[in-house]
Image (spheres, rainbow, N blue to C red):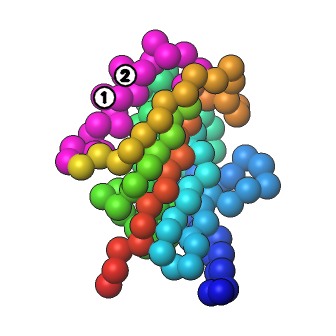
Amino acid sequence: MTPQKKEVIIPVGGAKPLAPYSPGIKLNGQLVYTSGQVGIDPSTGKLAEGGVVEQAKFVMENLKKVIEAGGAGMDTIIKTTVFLTDMADYGPVNEVYGQYFSENPPARSAVAVVGLPIGALVEIEAVAFVKEE
């Protein structure tokens, strides 16, 4: 059996974790798993103001930073899960999300939840494969 290697990913300039978790994990140098990203502005450490669209923009940028710090790319994401506190926000979040996946989007689930950390309206997690060099 091949030994498993787990590497913690902490992106430079990324949003700081809100609890004891890693922003991302690289497994065996092949897969990157992200923690759920919320719309925190890394420059302030606070939730983005302006509603779900502004939060979604920061969510996607924060997700991108973790993915890229792990050696993967937005084009190598194979699965995402979107958590929304209100399914009425599905359309606006989808507009932002779609800007990052214009071709060959990953598999995705969208789930309505009762609440998210720090009052966030949207949270997204992802799994990606590491690009071969």
Q: Residue at x 29, y 46 (%)?
A: 105
Q: Is residue 68 magenta?
A: no
Disc 2 residue type (three-letter):
Pro
Instruction: Residue lying at the far left in this picture: please name it.
Output: 103
Give the secondary structure at mark 1.
helix
80 to 92, vertically: above or below: below
Report the front residue among 94 and 118.
94
Q: Residues within 10 Å of mark 1 (few under 14, many from 20)?
A: few
Q: Residue at x 64, y 23 (%)?
A: 113
Q: Position of residue 104 (x, y in %)?
A: 24, 49
21 relative to 113 in the view: left or right: right
Residues drawn in magenta: 84-103
Count of all numbered marks drawn on residues in the image? 2
Q: Quadrant of residue 26?
A: bottom right
Instruction: Tell me if residue 62 can be seen.
Output: no
Look at 49% across and 51% down and name the residue there.
126
Screen quadrant of the C terminus:
bottom left
Which quadrant would the N terminus be assigned to in this image?
bottom right
Q: Which residue of the protein is positioned furthest toward the top in this rendering?
A: 88
Judged by its main secondary structure, the magenta piece is helix
Q: Which residue is mark 1?
A: 95
Q: Is residue 120 above or below residue 129?
A: above
Image x and y of residue 33, in percent: 56, 60
* Category of crowding for the residue at label 2, using alpha-carbon neighbours closer than 10 angstroms: few (below 14), some (14–19), many (at least 20): few
SS for callout 2: helix
* Residue linked to disc 2: 92
Task: Indicate which disc residue 104 carries.
Answer: none
